[in-house]
Amino acid sequence: MDHHYVENELSYLERMLPRVANGPLPMSYWRERIESLRPPAEIRSLGLRLIALKKRMREVEAIART
């Protein structure tokens, strides 16, 4: 996957994540968008951001279930 695309998606999803629980789209939509990202292995920082985003998504999902 192109690193520019992944960078843009990560930036967008990082901004949107605090709002997804209250939005019109289901949590599964956001989960699938996050899971579809495949950062290039040679750009470690994108991989680390994706890991952090997945962790925050799990936290948002847990809060939304309560």
Image (tube, rainbow, N blue to C red):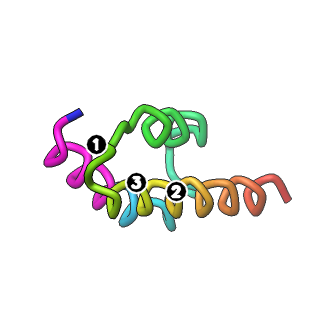
Choose mark 2 or mark 1, whichever is in front. Answer: 1
Residue assigned mark 2: 51
**Rounded to the nearest whole Å, what is the CA distance between mark 3 and mark 1?**
8 Å
Q: Nearer the viewer, residue 20 or 62?
A: 62
Crowd band around label 2 with a 10 angstrom C-alpha radius: few (<14), some (14–19), many (20+):
few
Q: CA distance from mark 2 to mark 3?
A: 6 Å
* Rendering quarter of residue 46: bottom left
* Label number found at residue 47: 3
- Dot 2 or dot 1, earlier in sequence: 1
Residue 8, compared with residue 40, is above or below; it is: below
Judge whether residue 3 is colored magenta.
yes
Which structural element holds mark 2?
helix
Comes first in the chain, label 3 or label 1: 1
The percent coordinates of residue 27 (x first, y second) are 60, 42
| Helix, strand or loop under label 1 | loop
Magenta range: 2-12
CB atoms at circles 2 and 3 under 8 Å apart? yes
Tell me the kind of residue under disc 3: Gly
Label number found at residue 40: 1
